[in-house]
Amino acid sequence: MEEEEEDITPGHSRTSDQVIGSLTAVCMITGLIGNITAFLYFWGRKRGSLHNMLYMTITAVDISTSLSAISIVVVLFNNRAPFLLGNSLFCTQWYVIIAFTVRMSIFLVVLISVTRTINIVFPFHRVSYHRLIYAMLLYGAWILTFDGVVFGMKIMYPRYEAHYAYCAPFPPDIANLTTMQIVWWILLEAEFMLPSFVVFISFTASIVSLQKRALLKNWRDVKSRRVSVTITLFTAVFLVCNTPFFLYQMNVIIYRTSYHTYGLDFNKAGPVYWYGSLVSQPLTTFLNAALNPCLYFLRMRPMKLWICNVVEDRACRFCNVARRASRGLIPQLSTSEEK
């Protein structure tokens, strides 16, 4: 059995897999609980500001991202055996979903960062609500259409790779890439990398503008400043979590170029490369999805009050039911106690 396990993932440590799997599971559980709670909060305030709508959308995307972690956790705790990811249909659907949610999440962060930077730098300029909705719909349609064409025509096809511990797209013949495959790689890398530059520029502009702005005592200005700081922290978390991913994408470009130039083999890259792929891509993505609701709770006072009120209301109802049961005011409970 040990020889078979080594054949599946040579050079990998099972202890390291379990540690990364445990971290991924923690991020998954935190992301699901936190984002579902945040989604319900923003859904109740969906008629509020523009950023409430964007936050509600990104929490829905983060819920889907967190659910995608289940397959990776199962794989890492079972010596990287593929299980459902070994099925080509499930593998394709899994990759399409996680690729869509990751790119949409990045796009939404860009929208939040840019719109808030515009509000900070140009406080009297209003961003169109409907234009942002159209932008999200068009970008989502672009992702699904382009990926659908690429995977439907077998230009690229996702397959499970034990070294990665997840499904990734591969060309039928990596030694002879077609023009369409090269275009797809370039566009995919651009969708992952360019938003980081945009978010970084918006983050820098927001920081500079907030430092130059005088402190005002008007409660609306104080509230606006607090919201601006929250969104600035939100983009900072995005940059911290996505910097390893950005660096990995740069490494992928260099490695793929070296493959055609020097004939390097991905299977001989070594465990450092493969663990770097595992940590910098899915793990940091799940970490970002888990940290976002934590930031909402720490920075948004109305959300704190809403959660506290919901918990207190549920606790009071439970206490009232318990008190009535103890006093014999609930027939079913009182008869069962007498027996």
Image (cartoon, helix red, strand yellow):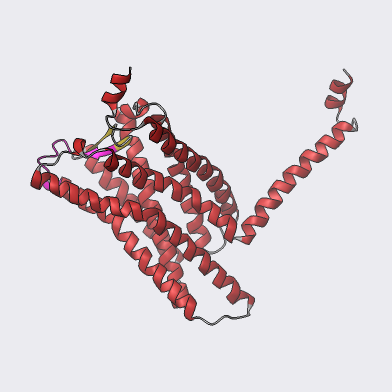
| Residue found 20% across the figure and 51% down from its top | 253
| Residue 113, horizontal then vertical, whole percent | 43, 65
| Up-down relation of residue 7 to residue 111 (above or below) | above
| Quarter placement of the N terminus | top left
Using the rendered view, name the quadrant where residue 149 is placed. top left
| Residue 238, horizontal then vertical, whole percent | 42, 57
Q: Is residue 86 visible?
A: yes
**Numbered-mark total:** 0
Horizontal arrangement in the rendering, residue 232 relative to residue 278 (left or right) = right
| Quarter placement of the C terminus | top right
| Residue 232, horizontal then vertical, whole percent | 47, 65
Using the rendered view, name the quadrant where residue 170 is placed. top left
| Residue 215, horizontal then vertical, whole percent | 57, 80
Horizontal arrangement in the rendering, residue 122 relative to residue 39 (left or right) = left
| Residue found 38% across the figure and 30% down from its top | 14
Q: Quick one: 208 or 337, which is closer to the camera?
A: 208
Q: Quick one: 208 or 279, which is closer to the camera?
A: 279
Q: Is the magenta stretch mostly helix, strand or loop?
A: loop
Q: Give the range drawn in magenta.
A: 168-180
| Up-down relation of residue 317 to residue 9 (above or below) | below
| Residue found 28% across the figure and 34% down from its top | 163
Residue 63 colored in magenta in the image: no
| Up-down relation of residue 284 to residue 326 (above or below) | below
Q: Can residue 61 be seen in this view?
A: no
Residue 174 colored in magenta in the image: yes
Horizontal arrangement in the rendering, residue 176 relative to residue 295 (left or right) = left
| Residue found 40% across the figure and 71% down from its top | 204
